[in-house]
Image (tube, grey):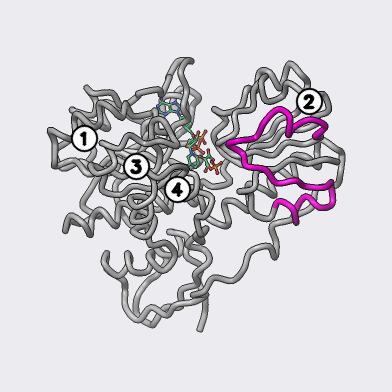
Amino acid sequence: MKIIADENMPYVEQVFADIGEVSLVNGRQLSAEQLEGADVLLVRSVTQVNAQLLAHNDSLKFVGSATIGTDHIDTQLLAQKGIPFSNAPGCNAIAVGEYAFIAMLELAAMTGSSLKQRTVGIVGAGNTGSQVARCLEAYGVKTLLCDPVLAASGDSREFHSLDQLIASCDVISLHVPLTKDGIEPTWYLLDEARLSALKPDAWLLNCCRGEVIDNRALIRVKQQRADLRLVLDVWEGEPNPMPELVPLVDIATPHIAGYSLEGKARGTTMLHSALSQVLNIEPENKLDGLLPVHVFSRIKLENQPDESALLQLCRLIYDLRDDDRKFRANYALAGGFDQLRKNHTHRREFSALALVKGSGFEVDWLTKLGFSGASL
Ligand SMILES: NC(=O)C1=CN([C@@H]2O[C@H](COP(=O)(O)OP(=O)(O)OC[C@H]3O[C@@H](n4cnc5c(N)ncnc54)[C@H](O)[C@@H]3O)[C@@H](O)[C@H]2O)C=CC1
Ligand SMILES: O=C(O)C(=O)[C@H](O)COP(=O)(O)O
């Protein structure tokens, strides 16, 4: 089988070797000509899978996207052509949850305040939003959820409206798909009126899609409101963020919130399972043994960590400040945004680090946060 895969899909050649020959391509530049004769197409979020891309191909048996979002896929077209499609829901949800949690700890350190004293509003309570809530609740931070779609579907959690969250939360973290229609469209969900209504000293995080915030309105509001703190991992108009916006942002990264090695590997192996099912091949667990041991495999805690020690511990797994520095230095260069993503050194998830505790204090909350437990 001829498999065309995005070059930024860790382990893809290894994982798919039993099904066919994998050719790696630049996903953003993939052309209809390159796709001629391919049986399987494996993409990431930068490839628009549409009629133009499929124009010279009549052999595709499967399209997979190793992502949660599907806004780059014309799923209707694939259904019309009878081409099975699968994405990888939840594959990088833990990575996004940990990114948002670490970003909030960094903002607390930056502003000399405490995350624990804040109430965090999570907009979109699906896979990624729930992981943010899990981290915050493990640490003892109050969270409020907004998800009218899940509320209407009978989800038993307590939900609030977006405007209630904006009025009452000190932090707003966005975790919705990008949709232009339907009953709850998210395009420019945070418009000028909502941005202006954010509480004094509020923090706003966007780890879902750039266009969920009206970025021009954000520039105008932030220019008037120095009290607002911003964490942006996603940008309107990627791969070209608005240059006036970047200096106004406290933590800026190139759409890598989901880039943990575990998350990427899960995305690849989930697509392998989906394709195996389509081809009627016995699915294998390919994730076991794929990931290397983390450089710090275990750490001994002598005391209960306070917020500052917790941040130090998190930085052993992921020092967000490195990505922020690289972003500011490179995003405006030609191809800079994509290069940052391509060359990103995939971080690990909390579970890669085992904590050994000294006697006389509890670390249950740290294992709930995601770290592994270990005995001496
Ligand atoms: N920055 C990054 O690296 C990543 C970004 N993403 C983005 O995050 C999005 C969310 O991912 P998941 O949580 O895994 O998706 P999900 O589908 O599990 O959850 C999204 C939730 O948003 C809710 N929702 C839809 N419209 C809403 C609205 N108007 N207001 C409030 N809630 C609404 C849905 O009901 C759903 O529960 C993805 O669609 C993708 O675009 C996902 C992974 C990584
Ligand atoms: O899963 C999603 O949705 C995402 O946004 C991905 O983390 C983006 O990663 P790429 O597919 O663009 O590498």
* Disc on the earlier residue, 4 or 2: 2
* Disc on the earlier residue, 2 or 3: 2
- In the rendered image, residue 272, in percent from the top left (x then y), is placed at 74, 45
Residue behind mark 3: 232
Nearer mark to the viewer, of 1 and 3: 3
Q: Amino acid at mark 4?
A: Ala
Label 1 to label 3, Cα distance in Å? Answer: 21 Å
* Disc on the earlier residue, 1 or 4: 1
On the picture, is 26 further left or further right than 129?
A: right
Q: Is residue 163 above or below residue 361?
A: above
Residue behind mark 2: 57
* Disc on the earlier residue, 2 or 1: 2
Residue behind mark 1: 168
* Quarter of the rendering occupied by the N terminus: top right
Q: Is residue 91 visible?
A: yes
Label 2 to label 3, Cα distance in Å? Answer: 37 Å
Label 4 to label 2, Cα distance in Å? Answer: 33 Å
- In the rendered image, residue 141, in percent from the top left (x then y), is placed at 30, 51
Disc 2 crowd rating (10 Å Cα; few below 14, some 14-19, many 20+) is some
Q: Residue at x 44, y 44 (%)?
A: 337
Q: Amino acid at mark 3?
A: Leu
Disc 1 crowd rating (10 Å Cα; few below 14, some 14-19, many 20+) is some
Taking the magenta stretch, the answer to whether it contains residue 26 is: yes
Q: Amino acid at mark 1?
A: Ser
Q: Amino acid at mark 2?
A: Asn
Q: Residue at x 19, y 35 (%)?
A: 222
Secondary element under disc 1, as helix, strand or loop, is: helix
